[in-house]
Image (cartoon, rainbow, N blue to C red):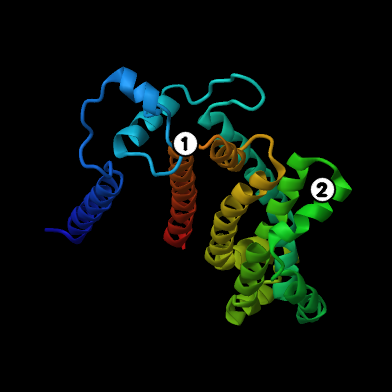
Amino acid sequence: MPLRAKSAVLSALLLAVLLGIWHLATLPKGGPAQAVDPEYAKLMGLDKPKSDGLPTLAQLGGTIAKQLADPFYDAGSNDKGIGTQVAYSLGRVALGFVLAALVALPLGFAIGLSPLVHGALDPFIQVLKPISPLAWMPLALYTIKDSAVSSIFVIFICSVWPMLINTAHGVASVRRDWLNVARTLEAGTARTAFQVILPAAAPTILTGMRISMGIAWLVIVAAEMLVGNLGIGYFVWNEWNNLSLANVIFAILVIGVVGMVLDFLFGLAQRAVAWVE
């Protein structure tokens, strides 16, 4: 059996084990559910939904089916489908990520090409890089006074550092022989940058962008929990306030799947660049 097939079988077995554990953990404590007289159940409060336990697999499956049946419904400002929530989050992530790329890529080129620029900016990078992106949220809310724009700013902050550092490292790692050949051929600065340095540094740059996107998708969930409004993070927090654990777990699964897809797309881009090289 090929290795990929063996891996798929092992993954399926692990999933079955996890689902089995979940099923056993959510069984009624008194054993399998038994028929109860409706009037007695109502009198004893047994018909009231419980909020102190994980949903069963059947309940989670019903929630997933219900949410995916109409993912873009709009029932008011605080009640929108999961597709709409994810779209808002992706939009914020995309805008913050693009703004970070517009700053990080040219600045990374300058740092990688110039030891002087590297020495001047490195202290600032080392101080600002370890700061949690969410620590900037109060300052952003105070100065920008808009929760949606503030969350985009936080995405910008968390995305800029991996791209900046990887771009600078990739540019600085370009073989000197190639640069010397470009000088010998009297290639201009722009031509050398786009035809020699950029292709050589592209795999490292894409690695930085891939890391930045992963961090951005992590941070947007926490940012939206803080600032509210629309987004997948707000959806998680709102459903928790409604004591709907099934919706919370469903949203967590959606966050994981979207993150996996984003990482997969950047992985394809990396393989394409490596193939071209």
Per the image, the residue denoted by label 1 is 247
The answer to whether mark 2 and mark 1 are in CB contact below 8 A is no
Q: Position of residue 233 (x, y in %)?
A: 59, 43
Amino acid bearing label 1: Asn
Q: Observer-nearest residue: 99 or 85?
A: 85
Amino acid bearing label 2: Leu
Residue 105 visible: no
Residue 276 visible: yes
Q: Is residue 46 above or below residue 122?
A: above
Q: Position of residue 100 (x, y in %)?
A: 71, 55
Q: What is the quadrant of residue 232 in the picture?
A: top right
The residue located at (26%, 21%) in the rendering is 37
Q: Secondary structure at mark 1?
A: helix
Give the CA distance from mark 2 to mark 1: 29 Å
Q: Is residue 61 left or right of residue 220?
A: left
The residue located at (54%, 56%) in the rendering is 214
Residue count near mark 1 (Cα–Cα under 10 Å), binned few <14, some 14–19, many ≥20 = many
Q: Is residue 215 left or right of residue 22?
A: right
Per the image, the residue denoted by label 2 is 141
